Amino acid sequence: MSPEFQLIEAFVHAAAASPRAPRGPGDDAAVLPRQRGASCVTVDAVVDGVHFRRASSRLEDVGHKALAVNLSDLAAMGARPRWALVGLGVPRGFRLGDARRLGVGFGALARATGTALVGGNVTRARELSLTVTVGGEVASRRALLRSGARPGDRVWVSGTLGDARLGLSLLERSGGHEARRLRRFPRLSHGVIERQRNPVPRIELGQALVGLASACIDLSDGLAQDAGHLAAASKVALDLDGGALPTSAALVTAYPEARARARAAATGGEDYELLFTVSATREAAVRRLGRRLRLELTAIGAVRRGSGVHLRGAGTAPVRGFDHLA
Amino acid sequence: MSPEFQLIEAFVHAAAASPRAPRGPGDDAAVLPRQRGASCVTVDAVVDGVHFRRASSRLEDVGHKALAVNLSDLAAMGARPRWALVGLGVPRGFRLGDARRLGVGFGALARATGTALVGGNVTRARELSLTVTVGGEVASRRALLRSGARPGDRVWVSGTLGDARLGLSLLERSGGHEARRLRRFPRLSHGVIERQRNPVPRIELGQALVGLASACIDLSDGLAQDAGHLAAASKVALDLDGGALPTSAALVTAYPEARARARAAATGGEDYELLFTVSATREAAVRRLGRRLRLELTAIGAVRRGSGVHLRGAGTAPVRGFDHLA
């Protein structure tokens, strides 16, 4: 048996308790169960040295994150996860045990979310990468899109912003004053590092927003940048209030000054929260949903005619999002 | 606009005349058209230094091949191609013009095969890679599998074997006597290099085999190795006749000796032909199909009880397939 087959078998076996398609890994392609609703598909990759560093990462977390970032895209469409395919790029010296650890992290999230691992592929490469494709189903046949925001709608966001970026500074020991301030609080430091390593895709929220939200996007590159995509797709302007951005105790500790904190929240990256717009008349429904899901949902601004993202209360310098390639 | 968006836009734009899904590139996920038949999905990657070398490749060919190897997997399931997602890994110094050239090659094959490019993702990486996911539809709801071969069936293969591997030797200047013999014949040399660079997935053949073949697999790792997968999945033995393996004029020129030629045909790799089994009573139907598709279909052996692949007339040393990781 070639190393290629052994590696993918080790990965699939470790992730194996995830639900299976009728014909899964092992044939030339997977045959999927039939679906009633509309199908959504998306692909995203995590690469060593770009999205994580092996030296500061557990491979279980890498497996989790590779799936989580994709499920976050399905969440933004209001889709229920159904299946996943994994393309592994592995460097020399990558071991069966390493493939198993990736599979353990991937499989735990796959099981928790009902995602069937239906196939995969391994190739040699200079650095470790996981390219994950996921498919989901929208029950109502109408997916959430980025393009539905209308003037007068309110802008909402889930959870808290900026934590994952702060966690990355701690992991990389690259932060300035703010990281030094936070390091004195081990529980808060651990929390933001976990946000970085183990993002939680907002799958239930996304499904619940179908029929309620007018537009939705997930936050992977930072609020400022991703809000810009939603504004452009909807051909509207978004007025956001920097003082209203939801932040954790860790962010308040690291950034005691309000404008600096708002900038950190707006540009963080890798939040994997959902940004969405809802008619102003349906505020009560959004608040009920937050209580039902036990998830903080915060109104952070409004949609108006125009273009671009206008963030008040975050200083005057241009605010750009997080860009892996920058 | 970040380099990431510019690169994926350049790729998608160059490939853009391919048919589009109702909601394609640009939202968090693509929403697919509804299908009647069973859906098949598969993923495969091509990586610089493993599956091609930039120094000896045109990027148009790399874009073609990345899609072709996936469509070959769909062909082996009897599926009609429907959609594709592309994950690009790009090294520093990769230009917009490079992304466009990849897209041109990808798009030409996508158009020719009715494959809609519905989304993509770019990430930085140390070497160029394309991880392509494709989805297809089986009209009859019954996909071709590797597991249906029965004792008494005949074993068939499409096209000719071993050419792509020979083309690789010429490109890499790594071949021995056989490459030197072939280099004297420019037309034959060009032909095997094209087989290496521009494989033609057997999509029409695969669809026509639904209801006729009992099992099917595509040949990516060499006949010997892939026949082994089909035998294992079907829990049967395959007796193959080395003297019956279909070979081109180029292979005959490079390997004048019959046993050496049979070994080259059995172990070549990257043929992207289909190996399939059919009841012995339906030989006439296979021959009619070959004439209709103007494609050489050759009976190369038989299925019997037992296990493994038994290749007569190719010498006594163990015959192994081509393994990218070896």
Image (cartoon, coloured by chain):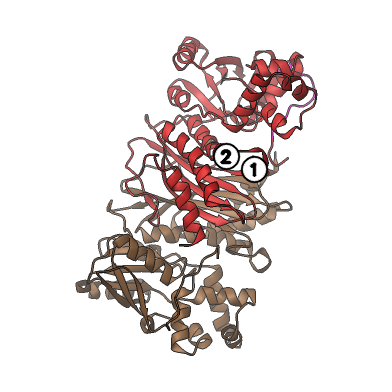
Chain colours: A red, B brown
- The residue drawn where x is 36% and y is 56% is B79
Which SS type dominates the magenta stretch? loop
Q: Is residue A268 visible?
A: no
Task: Please provide percent x and percent y for residue A21.
Answer: 35, 44
Looking at the picture, does residue B317 appear above or below residue A39? below
Q: Residues within 10 Å of mark 2 (few under 14, many from 20)?
A: many
Disc 1 packing (10 Å; few <14; some 14–19; many ≥20): some
Q: Say above or below: A283 vs A263.
A: above
Quadrant occupied by the C terminus of chain B: bottom right
Left or right: A189 in relation to B69: right
- At a point 62% along the width and 30% down the height, the residue shown is A196
Residue at 66 percent across and 15 percent down: it is A249
According to the picture, the residue beneath numbered tag 1 turns out to be: A54
Q: Is residue A18 above or below residue A147?
A: below
Q: Write the start and end of the magenta stretch as one range.
A: A312-322
Determine the image quadrant of residue B71.
Answer: bottom left
Element type at marker 1?
helix
For disc 2, the chain is A
Q: Quadrant where the N terminus of chain B lies?
A: top right
User: How many angstroms separate mark 2 from mark 1 (CA)?
Assistant: 9 Å
* Residue A119 percent location from the top left of the image: 43, 49
Mark 2 is on which residue type?
Answer: Val
Q: Work out whether residue A243 or residue B238 is closer to the camera in this orientation and state it.
A: B238
Viewer-side residue, B306 vs B206: B306
Question: Which mark, residue B106?
Answer: none
Residue kind at label 1, given as amino acid type: Arg
Is A128 displayed left or right of A293 in the figure? right
Q: Are marks 2 and 1 in contact (CB under 8 Å)?
A: yes
Query: Which label number is shown at residue A62?
Result: 2
